[in-house]
Amino acid sequence: CVEITGDAACGPNVVDMTFTYYGCRNLTTAACGPNVVRMQGTYQKCTNLTTAVCGNNVESMSETYMHCCNLTTAVCGDNVTDMGYTYRGCRNLTGNPVCGPDVTNMRGTYYNCINLTGSPVCGDQVTTVYDTYYGCTNLSSNGYFYSDKITNVRNCFYGRNTSKRLNLYVPAGSTTLTTCLSNTLT
């Protein structure tokens, strides 16, 4: 879809945008209709995309902006439950990552987002943070990492720059902190 240039469009009756603009390298602006529920892979590999959007009814945005290397800010709607690999490889994202209040899956969400500089986040409902901040070498500051539902934390912060201070606040009695901070692949 390399021939589409400029802005994306989405009508008010659209519910499913799955892979709609996949690989449209010349798009610069994203769109999302008010009734869209599924955005899986919608803008994946749109390398010139500079803006991200997420409608209020979106529940799944897995892989939506994967490899959109010119995005600078992340978004997440209030009803999103799946953010798996949403911003993977978006190396120009800066500032704080985002996570909606209903998100359960953050697997690989910010994988190799090397310019994120803010605090890592994790919503109250999150169960999976496998590879979430893998390779995010510039994360620092204070992070409120609260979810007593987390069951999969493998490699969450693998490859982080250990010379940067990263304070994580977790639930009292958490048994996941050691694994979460592990800098090994196991």
Image (cartoon, rainbow, N blue to C red):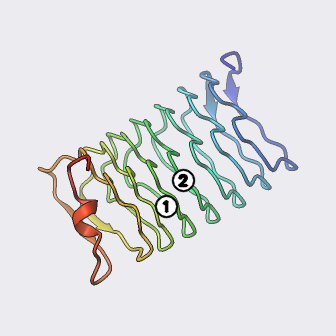
The residue shown at (41%, 67%) is 151
The label number, if any, that marks residue 126 in the structure image? none
| In the foreground, 96 or 145 | 145
Q: Pointer 2 and pointer 1: residues touching (CB < 8 Å)?
A: yes
Give the residue pinned by disc 2. Answer: 83
In this rendering, the count of numbered labels is 2
Q: Earlier in the sequence, mark 2 or mark 1?
A: 2
- Picture coordinates of residue 66, whole percent (x, y): 52, 37
- Picture coordinates of residue 51, whole percent (x, y): 57, 40
The residue shown at (62%, 25%) is 23
Q: Note whether 47 is above or below 30 in the view shown.
A: above
- Picture coordinates of residue 111, whole percent (x, y): 39, 43
Q: Note whether 69 is above or below 74 in the view shown.
A: above
Give the residue pinned by disc 1. Answer: 99
In the rendered image, the quadrant that contains the N terminus is top right
Name the amino acid, label 2: Met
Q: Is residue 114 left or right of residue 18?
A: left
Given the current orientation, which residue lies at the most extreme left position? Answer: 163
